[in-house]
Image (spheres, rainbow, N blue to C red):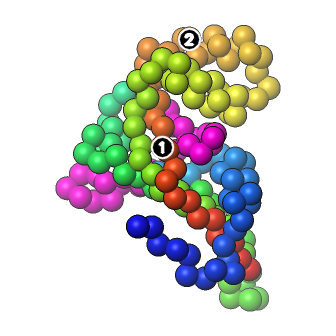
């Protein structure tokens, strides 16, 4: 169903692929947009337990696209170093494919937003994070993408 990487020597190990997803701070979420045009949007995320989590507004292009199709891909670029003297780049990236959904379960939503808050405000206290989450809770829309296939690629 999913294509295998053609250049096998550039394939990252499972551990390297997960490390890229863990340390990355942003990626590009690709969905089926309006009139079947691809819709790719940069977005912050957190990776945990084989899933990716995002937060977004309660309405808009992303949610309209997810309503049409739950299939999505997400790309993180970890390294992109141009090496002019070699006419190449040293690169490392990951592409994940899966199904995305709006999290409805309160416990699941809270767990995901707490992971996002910890990743993006690691120096804040637990009390500060909880206060901010509570302040925004009613407006928060949390998305979860369960990874079905992931490929990491690197080379130089």
Q: Residue at x 63, y 41 (%)?
A: 49
Percent position (x, y) of residue 36?
A: 23, 58
Residue 142, compared with residue 2, is above or below; it is above
**Which disc is residue 145 wearing?**
1
Chain part drawn in magenta = 30-55
**Mark sitting earlier along the chain (2/1):** 2
Percent position (x, y) of residue 86?
A: 74, 89
Q: Is residue 15 visible?
A: yes
Q: Residue at x 69, y 81 (%)?
A: 9
Q: Residues within 10 Å of mark 1 (few under 14, many from 20)?
A: many
Residue 93, compared with residue 87, is above or below; it is above
* Label 1 secondary element: strand
The foreground one among 136 and 52 is 52
Q: Nearer the viewer, mark 2 or mark 1?
A: 1
- Residue furthest to the left: 35
Percent position (x, y) of residue 60?
A: 32, 36
Q: CA distance from mark 2 to mark 1?
A: 23 Å
Q: Residue at x 20, y 56 (%)?
A: 35
Across the whole image, how many numbered discs are drawn on residues?
Answer: 2
């Amino acid at each position: 169903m999913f294509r295998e990487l053609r250049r096998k020597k550039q394939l990252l190990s499972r551990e390297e692929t997960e490390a890229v997803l863990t340390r990355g701070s942003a990626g590009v979420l690709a969905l089926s947009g309006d009139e079947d045009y691809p819709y790719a949007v940069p977005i912050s995320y957190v990776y945990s337990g084989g899933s990716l989590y995002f937060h977004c507004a309660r309405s808009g292009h992303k949610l309209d696209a997810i309503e049409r199709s739950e299939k999505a891909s997400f790309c993180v670029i970890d390294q992109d170093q141009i090496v002019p003297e070699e006419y190449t780049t040293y690169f490392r990236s990951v592409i994940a494919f899966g199904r995305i959904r709006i999290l409805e379960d309160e416990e699941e939503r809270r767990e995901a937003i707490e992971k996002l808050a910890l990743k993006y405000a690691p120096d804040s206290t637990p009390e500060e994070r909880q206060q901010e989450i509570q302040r925004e809770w009613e407006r928060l829309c949390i998305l979860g993408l369960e990874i079905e296939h992931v490929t990491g690629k690197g080379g130089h």
